[in-house]
Amino acid sequence: MISTKYLYFVVLSSCVLFAACGRQETVTAHAFPTAEIARAQAEIDKAPDLALGYSNLAMVYMKEARRTGDFSLNEEAVVAVARALEIAPADIPARKLEASLHLAHHRFAEAEVSAKKLQAELPSDSFAYGVLTDAYMEIGDYEKAVDSAQRMVDLKPGTASYSRVAQMRSLYGDHDGAIDMYTAAARSADPADKETQSWCLVQLGDEYWKNGKYGPAEKVYDEALQVYPGYFLALVSKGRVRASVGDYTAAEHLLTDVQANIPNANAIMLLAEIFSLRGDADAANLQYEKFEAMQDKLGVAADHRKLGLNWADRGKVEQALELARTEYAAEKSIHSADLLAWALYRSGYAAEAQPYVREALRLKTKDATLLFHAGMIAKANGDRPEARRLLESALKLNPGFSLVRAEEARNAIAELK
């Protein structure tokens, strides 16, 4: 799935790299950095046969994509990087950018190959280990991901490596450890880089939210907004926590404001759930349609897990199952296993779903959605005690993990009593 994490890490690393050289989800109109574009273009005009100008131009596009969530800008970055590599195939900055763009476009095998080549040439450079960590996490090779993250932090302790360690700890169910590392990532960020600080704080808040700690989560989101006012990721997460505590009016206001400036998939889906709870099926369906249109426009960079779950939950089971099987064939992650299990369940194949449930839960990840799916599948398979245990665990962990699915979980528990 596409994530700002890939662009965030590559931009952070590359800004440091370019400083030595003397340089420092799909949308609409926003304040584009025309001055930065002009400077990069002037550099290209001055030296059209040098790769550096094209890499710097790609950096501008990637930074803006990360800042705004307009991932269509990645395509402009791809063109610029391709030109840089055409001029200088061995150019390290351009190859680093290319590796991260592979990740953003779900080309994990290519990302691994690129990273390993960089690793062989620059064994003391932490960047390649970051790319490998991301690629291995996405394909479900978690042991290699852990090893790569550890190597990265050994080589260069700091925001980029701490964030990856935090994500690995979260995947393995170590909530306290993840909090520690996300906090370290936020506090180690360059104080002058407000967006990076805010990004780290949002990850910290999201870890609190996933574990049902809504007060600490909102406090961190507010801090992120103080550091970087108007940051769309912080606004969406704050809207989500407002919805989780039942303040739908405030949530709708925040999410609608985000949509007015930067259409965002998570904001769209949250609004759809709010409208569904209110009984406004037409408004909810409009949001679901917007979400699907956005994913269609993103193409290979779409969030396939969210898309597949949306199809499964809205009765488009054939599409969901086809997508889930394709995803699982390519990526043996806990999330692709969960998607396949849920698509099978929604398609009426609960018994076939069970092995994928076990796979999805194998890391003991504290994720209420995974527990909810497992509980509903256990219920369909007639295992009432296990179903009740899993569903109650999901709601205990994060009672507002999904406005609609949480209600479904409560109804299922009532049936099991």
Image (spheres, rainbow, N blue to C red):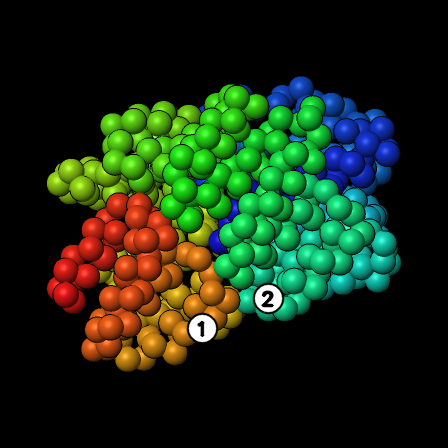
Q: Nearer the viewer, residue 40 or 183?
A: 183
Q: Give the Cα distance between marks 2 and 1.
A: 13 Å
Q: Nearer the viewer, residue 98 or 198?
A: 198
From the viewer's perspective, tell me whether residue 167 is left or right of residue 237.
right
Q: Is residue 298 positioned above or below 68 on the image? A: below
Residue at 59% x, 68% y is 141
Q: Is residue 184 positioned above or below 311 on the image? A: above
- Tally of marks: 2
From the viewer's perspective, tell me whether residue 398 is left or right of residue 84.
left
Q: Is residue 410 visible?
A: yes
Q: Is residue 30 visible?
A: no
* Image position, residue 228 (x, y; %): 55, 24
Pointer 2 local density, CA inside 10 Å: few below 14, some 14–19, many at least 20: many
| Quarter of the figure with residue 83 | top right
In the rendering, which numbered label is found on residue 211? Answer: none
- Please, what is the three-letter code of the amino acid marked with disc 2? Tyr
Pointer 1 local density, CA inside 10 Å: few below 14, some 14–19, many at least 20: some
* Image position, residue 405 (x, y; %): 25, 53
CB within 8 Å, label 2 to label 1: no
| Quarter of the figure with residue 317 | bottom left
Residue at 69% x, 48% y is 161
| Image quarter in which the C terminus is found | bottom left
In the rendering, which numbered label is found on residue 142? Answer: 2
Where does label 1 land, which residue? 359
